[in-house]
Image (cartoon, rainbow, N blue to C red):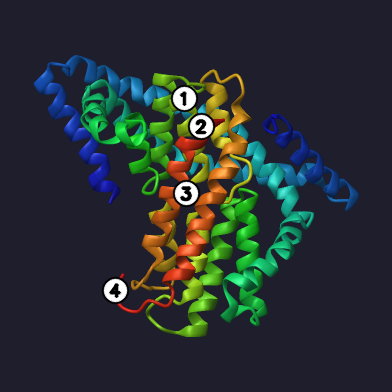
Amino acid sequence: MNIGIYVIPVVLTIIIGTGIIKHLPVFELFLKGARQGIASVFKIIPSILALVCAVTMLRSSGLLDALISLASPLLEPLGFPPELLPLSLLRPVSGSGSLAVLNDIYKNYGADSFIGKAASVMMGSTETTFYAIAVYFGSVGISKTRHTVPCALMADFTGMVMAVLSSRLF
Amino acid sequence: MMNYIWSGIILLSVVYSLFTGGAAALTNSVMEGAKSALALIAATAGMMCFWSGIMEIAQSSGITSAVSRLFKPVYRLLMPDLADNEEISSAVSMNVSANLLGLGNAATPLGLRAMSLMHAENGANSASNSMVMFVVLNTASLQLVPTTVAVLRAENGSTDPMGIITNVWLCSAAALIVGICSAKLLENRRGRL
């Protein structure tokens, strides 16, 4: 059962096929979208640079490993790999930061290792929660967000625990 | 917040390496990090551009609005007090379908429009139940195809970069259900939370 290899071909066929059936200028549309894509890539370069450097320093100073071994007596009995703690802490706060940590995890433990797989699932099934809350409520000037933060964090927590569980099972 | 996180990571790394005698390694790692940041950008940039090109076609061919029509009944269930307002419901469902397709650039403006319409409707300075539900939906990862993660996996030697997709769907769905149910359960509570 490997749906993964079919996702991209199917999506491409549906989207381009629909465009052609509707007589749309698909090539020009593609170029327009890709141009916007370049613009958003350029926009994230500075923050990626800032955070990848910081995470690389954290790793090479030995502090990251020290923190991981410090947390492991707490997390290991729960079945949660302490190597994933930095990612799960940074994920709700910073998109670039969690991408930097994810990249570091792949380089250190391998993308297909258990840690790498669980980290991939964690990254793919959660969002930059605090950023989204700040942007959406900030835009209308609401500071009383009531139950938003606890609900969003409960959802994130579920996603993270499930990422570890599902990577162990499948 | 990022001011403290970012400077905290760097300063604590420096202090720790001074105590453990790893200053040389730390110096190298700054240069190494700058290089691998650009490698990370280079690895993901092509696919990001390709995907946003494809999604531009999706949007123009009406796939986003078709998906948003599918979502309408669900939306009525989640935010019943706004179901009659056609303008808000279409902004909300377009935002959700843009999120499903991974159209971050399109999703945010639609979401902000939905928020300002909801704010105009209730006028209070505290979030309404529907606003909370809507933002909780936006803090869940609805994206169906995790392209950036897959590209980064491929770049780091994964033999099956998209192999994580069923797990991602399972975990996103679980997180989403918890988010929705907790928002529904907590919406009648008064006071600070």
Q: Is residue B181 above or below residue A60?
A: below
A63 on left or right of B92: left
Residue position for label 4: B192
Which mark lies nearer to you, 2 or 3?
A: 2
Residue at numbered disc 2: A167
Residue with the mark numbered 3: A127
Q: Circle 3: is it few (<14), some (14-19), or many (20+) Cα within 10 Å?
A: many
Instruction: Say if residue B8 shows up in the picture.
Output: yes
Pointer 3 chain: A
Residue bearing mark 1: A114
Residue B4: x %, y % from top left: 23, 46
In this view, the mark in front (3 or 1) = 1
Position in image of residue B2 (x %, y %): 29, 47
The image shows residue A82 at horizontal and vertical percentages of 32, 31
Report crowding for label 4: few under 14, some 14 to 19, many 20 or more residues within 10 A (C-alpha).
few
Q: Is residue B187 above or below residue A11?
A: below
Q: How far is the residue under mark 3 from the one under mark 1? A: 21 Å
- Mark 2: give few (<14), some (14-19) or many (20+) Cα within 10 Å: many
Q: Are marks 2 and 3 on the same chain?
A: yes
